[in-house]
Image (cartoon, helix red, strand yellow):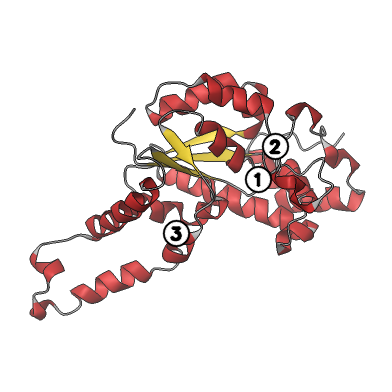
Amino acid sequence: MNQELSNVFIIGSPRSGTSALGWALAEHPDLWTSAETDILLYLLRKPWFHEQYQKALAEPEKRNWFIKHEVSFHEFASSIGDGLNQLFQSRSEKKVFVDSTPSYTSIAAELMLFFPNAKFLHIIRDGRAVVNSMLASGFSYKAYNNFRLACKSWVYYVNKGLEVMHAYPDHILEVRNENLISNPEKEMDLIFEFLGMESCTESATFLRTKRVNSSYMNVQKDDIRKAKDPSLMPQKPWTNWSLRNKKQFKKIAGTTMTSLGYDLRFE
């Protein structure tokens, strides 16, 4: 195992396969995952830590500890990250913790400060599949119950992830959901190479045989939490969208889809 690796963060739009990839990675003997943490979004989405650090430096005549010992913000932030990571590892049997909280896409740059030894996987999925999955999920989030907001949500998260990828290319690997489905062995080998770890065949097997939190074949409310057979997944359900929705999707998400190389045809 790569001793330098502290955490793996999977970022990307909700409904892009973040959970499935997290659980597939957890098949590796040195990796571990669980529920989404969420707490880091509340801690880092506003510059609270930056503000408190600046306050500590605001009166140099006091010669406070941070000034006397020349503590940079990077050192301060990574020390806090070390403490949080100890908490995560207290539940992960000291394995590398894999976090697949999609909302962390918006704070990925901050996470790099607090977890400098972490690696990031930016998973991207066809926006039509994401929007369809949001609307069929049964979740009560506002964007999951409004076609226009679902389209805008996908565009927002994808572009946020791309911004961070362009700024920190050595820390993030782009992963396409479609490639994970069509050739999981190859994609997982690439991911493990990026993480500096030995490949794990069980991870690819997981992706070939299971889907988690999937929005198809759900009858009861809790069915979305059940693992499902990938072969039963509907193919291109967006072909049945109304003409109005197809036009609206192209208007909102067309530019992003094209930039990512997706074919915008619906038939």
For the N terminus, the image quarter is top left
Left or right: where 202 falls relative to 220: left
Q: Are marks 3 and 2 in contact (CB under 8 Å)?
A: no
Q: Amino acid at mark 3?
A: Leu
Q: Residue at x 63, y 40 (%)?
A: 17
Q: Residue at x 84, y 39 (%)?
A: 237
Count residues near mark 1 (Cα–Cα under 10 Å), then give few for <14, some for 14-19, many for 20+.
some
Going from N to C along the chain, the mark reached first, 1 or 2, is: 2
| Quadrant of the rendered image containing residue 62 | bottom left
Residue 179, visible in the rendered structure: no
Is residue 256 shown above or below 77? above
- Residue in front for this viewpoint, 36 or 258: 36
**Residue beneath label 3, please?**
40
Count residues near mark 3 (Cα–Cα under 10 Å), then give few for <14, some for 14-19, many for 20+.
some
- Residue in front for this viewpoint, 26 or 105: 26
Is residue 267 shown above or below 106? above
Of circles 1 and 2, the one toward us is: 2
Is residue 135 shown above or below 237? below
**Residue beneath label 1, please?**
256
For the C terminus, the image quarter is top right
Q: Position of residue 39 (x, y in %)?
A: 47, 61
Q: Amino acid at mark 2?
A: Ala
Secondary structure at numbered mark 3: helix
Q: Residue at x 32, y 67 (%)?
A: 50
**Residue beneath label 2, please?**
227
